[in-house]
């Protein structure tokens, strides 16, 4: 999920600028009419796709049956905690650490290219509120596709393996030694 959508607020408009003159300009701008309400835009979809890409890089390992290395597991838990809301904005606005398997590092570099384009687009769009995304969307979409193609080239014949700690799942209930699906359990209980 896109960070702004998660918080229902703009994160990249000029209120976050550190330079004093720009802060003064922003304060003067917002002394006037109230800020428009948050609205969803198509760039949020691209950011969501980017987060899926990042999830793949941090979830999988490059050798079958292995555990996630400690740094990769810690980064995964920070990026994708088991509770909501996830506080991932800091990972979007700064560079991701390369705590991924060596085989994925070049592909992760492609995610960094897109991260930079996303942030640049957000800052550019949100100089006016509501954001004007129409100017940035074509370039961002094109860049996203180019980075995906580059990532596929880098990946080559790399295989993704689910780490052993993610394979631990509760087994389905069984009846007389036969495993039953959830659907067949419901049928048996109903009639």
Image (cartoon, rainbow, N blue to C red):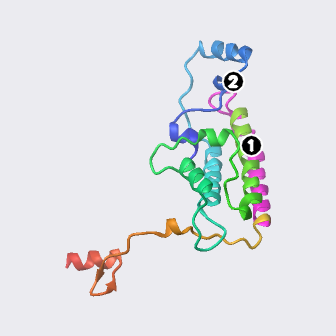
Residue 36: % across, % down: 56, 26
- Dot 1, crowdedness within 10 Å: few (<14), some or many (≥20)? some
The circle on residue 17 is 2
Residue 121 drawn at (x, y percent): 72, 39
Quadrant assignment for the C terminus: bottom left
Left or right: 129 with respect to 81? right
Q: CA distance from mark 2 to mark 1?
A: 17 Å
Instruction: Give the quadrant of residue 104.
Output: bottom right
Q: Which residues are magenta?
A: 125-153
**SS class, disc 1:** helix
| Precedes in sequence: disc 2 or disc 1 | 2
Q: Quadrant of residue 44?
A: top right
Relative height, residue 187 to residue 134 (above, below): below
169 over 123 or under it: above or below: below
View extreme (front): residue: 70
Q: Residue at x 65, y 12 (%)?
A: 28
């Amino acid at each position: 999920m896109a960070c702004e959508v998660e918080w229902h607020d703009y994160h990249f408009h000029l209120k976050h600028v550190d330079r004093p003159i720009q802060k003064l300009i922003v304060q003067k701008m917002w002394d006037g009419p109230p800020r428009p309400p948050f609205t969803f835009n198509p760039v949020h979809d691209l950011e969501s796709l980017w987060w899926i890409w990042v999830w793949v890089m941090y979830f999988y390992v490059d050798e079958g049956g292995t555990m996630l290395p400690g740094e990769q597991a810690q980064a995964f838990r920070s990026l994708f905690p088991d509770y909501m809301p996830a506080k991932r904005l800091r990972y979007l606005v700064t560079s991701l650490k390369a705590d991924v398997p060596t085989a994925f590092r070049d592909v992760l570099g492609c995610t960094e290219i897109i991260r930079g384009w996303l942030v640049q687009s957000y800052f550019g769009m949100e100089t006016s509120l509501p954001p004007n995304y129409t100017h940035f969307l074509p370039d961002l979409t094109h860049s996203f596709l180019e980075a995906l193609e580059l990532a596929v080239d880098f990946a080559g014949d790399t295989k993704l393996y689910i780490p052993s700690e993610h394979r631990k799942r509760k087994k389905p209930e069984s009846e007389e030694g036969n495993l039953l699906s959830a659907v067949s359990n419901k049928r048996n209980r109903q009639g």
